[in-house]
Image (spheres, rainbow, N blue to C red):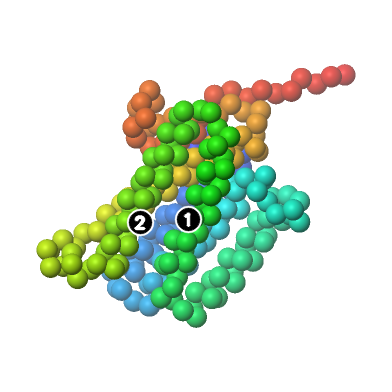
Amino acid sequence: MMYLLHPYACKRSLAVHLVWIMFIIVGLFSTYYHMTLSYLGQLLDEISILWVIAMGYSIWFPKPYFPDFIKNRHQFGTIIFIVAAISTLLSFVKPVVNAYALNCITFHILYVVVKEIRKCTDPAIRHLAFLSFSLWLVAISCWLSDRFFCEFWRTINFCYLHSLWHILICITVVYSNTLFAYFDALYEIPECQAQVQYWPFKSSRIGLPYLEITKCFVPKKHF
């Protein structure tokens, strides 16, 4: 995804790559947690997820939804950093609620997606949003079912829902991040014509979605 989104990052900001670097760190910490099932592993896993969400918010959250007292993205990023730092400290107080709190952030993300999709007429973007929501719905259903009906799944010897959650949420992140990158391009680099493509089959809607910059319109200078 860093390779596929590099042309967009060059036009927007190379900080876009930090999201995917953080995503790799989440994967490493999650692996450590599931190998050890330790308290330290749990905190590393959940705190890294918190910070990758904070990074995504700082870079991609659309400007029209900033609170009135925030004047620019730098101020917004500073506030997100402070909130994430406080949330990190609070995560030590009651670790059992961390996973639920992190999943609840999704509802705010869904709210923003719905607001943006209502303004969007591009069927390809609507399709991407639908896929992102559908993948998340199936993923969170696996997580909740595994969480609350574990005994039932054990009785039928089907203990794989949590692993399915990891696979599906990973794919969901790829789709939803590309969706927000598209919204971001509309606001932050409107002079660039951004289109969603899929790798490896560009002509179809199957594969990894990414943002392609087809052309940039440079305003003519008037002397």
Q: Nearer the viewer, residue 36 or 71?
A: 71
Disc 1 or 2, which lies upstream in sequence? 1
Judging by the rendered image, the residue that carries numbered circle 2 is 140
**Mark 2 belongs to which amino acid?**
Ile
Residue 209 visible: yes
Residue 150 relative to residue 33: left or right: left
Residue at image x 33%, y 53%? 139
Mark 1, other Cα within 10 Å: few <14 / some 14–19 / many ≥20: few
Judging by the rendered image, the residue that carries numbered circle 1 is 106
In which quadrant of the rendered view does residue 205 lie?
Answer: top left
Q: Is residue 4 above or below residue 44?
A: above
Rendered-image quadrant of the N terminus: top left
Instruction: Please give the count of numbered marks on the rendered protein.
Output: 2
Residue at image x 57%, y 43%? 115
Q: Is residue 122 above or below residue 62?
A: above
Helix, strand or loop for disc 1 = helix
Residue at image x 45%, y 29%? 124
Report, in whole angstroms, how far the alpha carbon at label 1 lies from the one at label 2. 10 Å
In x, y percent, where is residue 145?
28, 62
- Contact? badges 1 and 2 (CB < 8 Å): yes
Residue at image x 70%, y 54%? 67
Rendered-image quadrant of the C terminus: top right
